[in-house]
Amino acid sequence: MNGLQIQGYLGLAIGAVIVLLAATETVQLYPETWEWTMAQDWYKKNFNIFATAGILYYPVIFGIQFYMKDKEPFDLGGAKTKGLINWIFWWATGLAIFSILGAYYVLPSVIFTPIMEGRDWNTTVCGDSRPNLDEARPGFWIFIFCASKLFEFGDTLFVVLRKRSLIVLQHYHHLATMLYCWSAVIILGTDYNNATPAFACMNLCVHSVMYSWYAATRTGWRSPKIIMMAVTVLQLVQMVGGVALVTQTIVGGCQDPVTNYCLFMYISYFFLFSRLFIQNYLIPKATAACHKATSKCDKTKTKKDA
């Protein structure tokens, strides 16, 4: 067993213990008292941090990329790392554990409660969000989910520091999501609809799978192609769900001040993830078939000419 595998099993054990402690309520990972105005106050208090991060995001990312142009990439972990600590594995593991915990706390009130109460689609989306946002269990985790979007800028830092290919989807969606979550907390609050909890629930569930899969691949495990495809399809399903939610706020008459921004955001994500899926899984297959056919034709032509 090598160092990567040891860290992989250690990360799995740590994650399992943390989730078990939370699930059994041995450790309470939310405050005793909570209301959504506390989240709004925290965002207002830290306005300068979010504003500065948003403004400097692109200059820093592309500045580092330019600086690293003639430099050796940082060895921050991965399947071929020579370093002692697999930094990128622990980063992904931390985000996976966070997402699993968030899904555990948020999903029941967002998904199961409406089903058990027999609410229709419009009532679920356009109904009162206070039972979700003002309740400590889901509300606090929806808040830290929104705040975590600032820390997910670290994903992009890992890409440029390791000199990996930086695609539009990678850098754009982190900034756009952070800005939306910022506005969802401060501008929307509990005044318009129940979409924010649903958005958080979808993203936490998808990220639970995505970051767990990504962490596993950083230990040297070679993921079957079908799982890689399934992760991207899951992300596409999330974007379809996002568009459906925003559309319902418009149709149901409960749209909010950032509805148009949110709709554009989810549609753009859908097209970018679709493009990624096509480039990674459909075009290579078609190109391989083309090369194979060309090779056969070349052999036939050679025999004929001889």
Image (tube, helix red, strand yellow):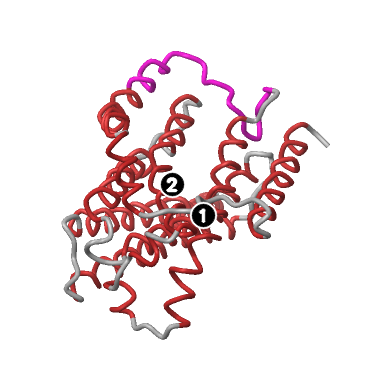
x and y percentages locating residue 152 in the rendered image? 43, 39
Q: Which mark is residue 144?
A: 2
- N-term-proximal mark, 1 vs 2: 1
Q: Is residue 82 magenta?
A: yes
Q: Mark 1 = which residue?
A: 102
Residue type highlighted by circle 1: Gly
Residue situated in front as seen by the camera: 110 or 209 = 110
Left or right: 286 in relation to 269: right
- Residue 123 visible at all: yes
Residue situated in front as seen by the camera: 173 or 47 = 47
Prevailing SS of the magenta stretch: loop
Task: Tell me the quarter of the image containing the N terminus.
Answer: top right
Rate crowding at label 2 as few (under 14), some (14 to 19) or many (20 or more) other CA atoms within 10 Å.
few
At horizontal 23% and vertical 62% (from top left) the residue drawn is: 191
What span is in magenta? 63-83
At horizontal 61% and vertical 36% (from top left) the residue drawn is: 90
At horizontal 65% and vertical 57% (from top left) the residue drawn is: 25
